[in-house]
């Protein structure tokens, strides 16, 4: 395999842009210009365009747990965070773990390490069961990798109606031993209970305070990335619960998506991704349904900023962070500051948009969310949920898709939202499908989104808030080791290996070559494979 330097990678992206240039296949929507009011009183009229930025693997407590101190929530509202509950929410230390004398639990604490937790916590279904219920069933699962775990995959029977959420320390110790081959010190496992303060992540915390924060927004599956990203747009994952085997996703995930419904209705949509990552994760997960849309709806992130500036956003935009070159997805153990900076870039673009004939700051709703909690501590028990298809309730690892996953940070930004709004209503990823289906009359995809609550109650202004009152936020400086391209020679993290696995599956292979160990080698393999398959450049 050849050498892929930063310079060559930039040239590769430039070539892709040239090859993909030409007349755009999607024109600006001819919607009304800036809204001055919502005369109908219908909250569905508060937005014409929706932009979703989905980050990676952080819980609500981890990112926004210290958003509001007790008694400081505006207008007498309630916010279910961790401030003042640190000892009450402590998780027990398992008896076999190394711990200081007299320490039996690990309390919630304010974290300052922007790359914690490190190493990456367990996020697969069996790990989430241990985190929620503090159970390891059977006992032989305790220090095993997920591929070797046995049924019932740490799930208690019967499943309690309320999970105690007291197994995060236990699971992190177990996962550490399984991945590192040694027991962690107290200082190595205690950070699983750490939560960032507003000063640590000023962008997302400021937006949460200045617009709306949803303190009971749950991901749809108590497991990892692919199944939750699939539910976000399909209200199903075709019965798959974990990222592996890789062939499941680009070959067998045939669940109809909201993109298919929008195509049928002629509603414009686009997925934007980093050009230096070469391929879209959303496309790989939904390949059976989206392969015919590759060259009409997938664009590089630079085009998103052009579209916002020109008032040319489609009705629905979905933004992927960079999983490889910039590593700004916030996925542990990557530094979270590049992700906070990305959030600010997207927000600033929308705040400054003022087209008179297309998308602009008054008619665009921005949703910032995360795919799943990624093993990071959260204290709220996920509720029950209906199976997407009651006739086929049992999926991979015997999961019945009858309960949601953990809370994730979700912030809604709109000119029609009062500053300091807290939405306590239980919401979930499929609430997006429900709300967009109501807006554009798309119909339900499955029983899951059919029963999901909408988030229309978020819009609590009849007149748009002037953008002169919108906050201007300064992100914290990003350290040099976390800047774009600084990680090319670094080892692949778990998600990067899994994305590589999807590309290999697209090429008919069960796994990528084991010789690929660095980010640079992975990007070269992705580009070569897509060229082989006739899928490069993967964009307009």
Image: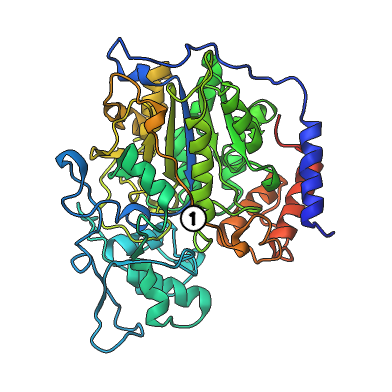
In the picture, which quadrant includes the C terminus?
Answer: top right
- Extreme residue toward the front, this view: 468
Q: Is residue 74 above or below residue 256?
A: below
- Extreme residue toward the right, this view: 2
In the picture, which quadrant includes the N terminus?
Answer: bottom right
Give the residue drawn at x 38%, y 67%: 192
- Extreme residue toward the bottom, this view: 101
Q: Which residue is mark 1?
A: 476
Q: Nearer the viewer, residue 294 or 87?
A: 87
Q: Is residue 267 above or below residue 476?
A: above
- Where residue 87 appears, as percent x and y from the top left, is 20, 69
Q: Nearer the viewer, residue 268 or 138?
A: 268
Q: Is residue 300 left or right of residue 267?
A: right
Q: Is residue 88 left or right of residue 20?
A: left
Give the residue drawn at x 69%, y 59%: 519
Viewer can see residue 139 = yes
- Where residue 508 appears, as percent x and y from the top left, is 71, 47
Q: Is residue 138 left or right of residue 513?
A: left
Mark 1 neighbour class, 10 Å CA radius: few under 14, some 14 to 19, many 20 or more: some
């Amino acid at each position: 395999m050849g050498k892929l330097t930063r310079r060559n990678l930039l040239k590769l992206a430039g070539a892709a842009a040239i090859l993909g240039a030409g007349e755009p296949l999607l024109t600006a929507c001819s919607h009304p210009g800036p809204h001055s009011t919502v005369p109908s009183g219908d909250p569905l009229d508060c937005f014409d365009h929706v932009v979703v930025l989905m980050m990676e693997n952080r819980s609500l407590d981890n990112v926004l747990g210290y958003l509001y101190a007790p008694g400081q929530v505006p207008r007498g509202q309630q916010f279910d965070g961790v401030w003042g509950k640190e000892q009450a929410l402590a998780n027990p230390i398992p008896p076999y773990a190394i711990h200081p004398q007299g320490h039996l639990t690990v309390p919630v604490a304010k974290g300052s390490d922007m790359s914690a937790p490190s190493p990456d916590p367990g996020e697969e279904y069996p790990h989430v069961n241990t985190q929620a219920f503090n159970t390891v069933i059977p006992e032989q699962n305790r220090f095993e990798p997920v591929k070797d775990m046995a049924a019932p995959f740490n799930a208690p029977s019967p499943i309690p109606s309320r999970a105690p959420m007291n197994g995060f320390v236990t699971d992190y110790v177990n996962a550490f031993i399984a991945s590192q081959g040694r027991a962690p010190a107290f200082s190595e496992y205690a950070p699983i209970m750490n939560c960032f303060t507003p000063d640590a992540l000023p962008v997302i915390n400021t937006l949460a305070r200045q617009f709306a924060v949803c303190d009971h927004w749950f991901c749809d599956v108590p497991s990892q990335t692919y199944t939750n990203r699939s539910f976000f747009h399909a209200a199903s994952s075709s019965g798959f619960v974990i990222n592996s085997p890789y062939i499941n996703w680009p070959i067998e995930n045939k669940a109809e998506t909201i993109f298919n419904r929008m195509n049928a209705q002629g509603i414009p949509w686009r997925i934007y991704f980093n050009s230096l990552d070469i391929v879209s994760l959303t496309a790989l997960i939904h390949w059976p349904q989206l392969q015919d849309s590759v060259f009409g709806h997938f664009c590089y992130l630079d085009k998103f900023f052009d579209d916002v500036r020109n008032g040319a956003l489609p009705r629905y935009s979905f933004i992927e962070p960079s999983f490889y070159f910039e590593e700004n997805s916030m996925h542990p153990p990557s530094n979270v500051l590049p992700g906070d900076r990305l959030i600010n870039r997207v927000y600033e673009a929308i705040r400054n948009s003022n087209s008179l004939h297309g998308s602009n700051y008054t008619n665009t709703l921005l949703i910032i969310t995360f795919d799943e909690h990624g093993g990071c501590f959260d204290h709220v028990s996920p509720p029950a949920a209906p199976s997407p298809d009651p006739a086929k309730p049992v999926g991979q690892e015997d999961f019945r898709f009858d309960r949601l996953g953990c809370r994730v940070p979700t912030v809604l930004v709109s000119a029609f939202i009062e500053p300091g709004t807290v939405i306590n209503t239980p919401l979930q990823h499929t609430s997006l499908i429900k709300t967009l289906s109501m807006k554009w009359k798309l119909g339900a995809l499955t029983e899951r989104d059919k029963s999901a609550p909408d988030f229309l109650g978020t819009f609590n202004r009849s007149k748009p808030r002037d953008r002169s009152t919108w906050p201007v936020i300064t992100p914290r400086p990003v350290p040099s080791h976390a800047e774009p391209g600084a990680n090319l020679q670094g080892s692949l993290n778990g998600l990067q290996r899994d994305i590589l696995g999807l590309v290999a599956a697209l090429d008919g292979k069960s796994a990528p070559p084991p010789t690929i160990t660095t980010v640079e080698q992975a990007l070269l393999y992705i580009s070569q494979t897509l060229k082989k398959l006739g899928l490069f450049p993967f964009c307009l």
